[in-house]
Image (tube, rainbow, N blue to C red):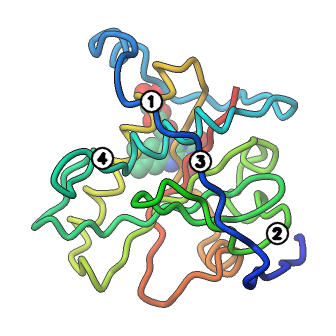
């Protein structure tokens, strides 16, 4: 596995393109097109606009400080990490940024299935267990965000699959994950 180059102040937050939060295919068409795909082409990336839109779909802000998904008691416990061929980063919905945690290719740590190691993007769906300690609510939150990623991908012509098969210890290490966070799923995205 790659060696993690830890980010200090030198790793600035990347401001993502403004998410496109209107328009798109009709909802019923998108739901009809939702599916899991594993035949992801390693040679094709996804655009920063798609990444921004997808992260907003999963966990963006909508109105009055609320989100695209419901959370029990509005605890807003979801935490999203993005693992690409070049870095691992954390999504900040408030500022629409990705802050690098480390540089390097850690896709291997995201999964036991080969396609995960070569796909352009793996989104780690995690929760802050201090904000929400109840496992069933944590699972609801990660599941709702996952479904929104599925729907965005169906709309945008991207391939995706949510995965529970990952090595928790390896992935926690790659993400430098604090003890209060817990990984629920990883969702692979590509073309
Ligand atoms: C909680 C959960 C965990 C899953 N884990 C994996 C996984 O580790 N690897 C995988 O290839 N697919 C995984 N899947 C995808 C399912 O296999 C897929 O959703 C199912 O076969 C139905 O296909 P569809 O999503 O195209 O409707 C998972 C799905 C869910 C909901």
Mark nearer the N terminus (1 vs 4)? 1
Confirm or deny contact between disc 1 and disc 4 (CB under 8 A): no
* Relative horizontal placement of residue 129, taking residue 104 as reference (left or right): left
Label 3 to label 4: alpha-carbon separation: 22 Å
The residue that mark 4 highlights is: 144
**Tag 1's secondary structure?**
loop
* Relative horizontal placement of residue 149, taking residue 4 as reference (left or right): left
The residue that mark 1 highlights is: 20
The label nearer to you, 2 versus 3, is 3
The residue that mark 2 highlights is: 103
Label 1 to label 2: alpha-carbon separation: 28 Å
The label nearer to you, 1 versus 4, is 1
Residue 27 position in % (x across, y down): 28, 16
Q: Quadrant of residue 89?
A: bottom right
Residue 92 position in % (x across, y down): 48, 63
**Tag 2's secondary structure?**
strand
């Amino acid at each position: 596995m790659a060696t993690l180059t830890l980010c200090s102040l030198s790793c600035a937050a990347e401001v993502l393109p403004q998410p496109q939060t209107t328009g798109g295919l009709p909802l019923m068409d998108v739901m009809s097109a939702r599916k899991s795909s594993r035949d992801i082409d390693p040679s094709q990336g996804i655009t920063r606009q798609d990444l921004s839109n997808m992260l907003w779909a999963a966990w963006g802000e909508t109105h009055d400080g609320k989100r695209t998904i419901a959370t029990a008691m509005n605890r807003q416990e979801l935490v999203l990490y993005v693992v690409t061929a070049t870095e691992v980063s954390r999504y900040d919905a408030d500022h629409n940024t990705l802050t690098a945690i480390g540089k390097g290719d850690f896709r291997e740590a995201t999964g036991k299935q080969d396609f995960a190691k070569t796909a352009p993007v793996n989104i780690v769906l995690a929760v802050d267990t201090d904000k929400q300690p109840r496992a069933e609510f944590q699972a609801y939150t990660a599941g709702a965000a996952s479904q929104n990623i599925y729907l965005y991908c169906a709309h945008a012509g991207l391939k995706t699959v949510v995965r529970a098969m990952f090595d928790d210890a390896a992935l926690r290490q790659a993400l430098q994950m604090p003890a209060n966070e817990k990984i629920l799923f990883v969702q692979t995205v590509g073309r």
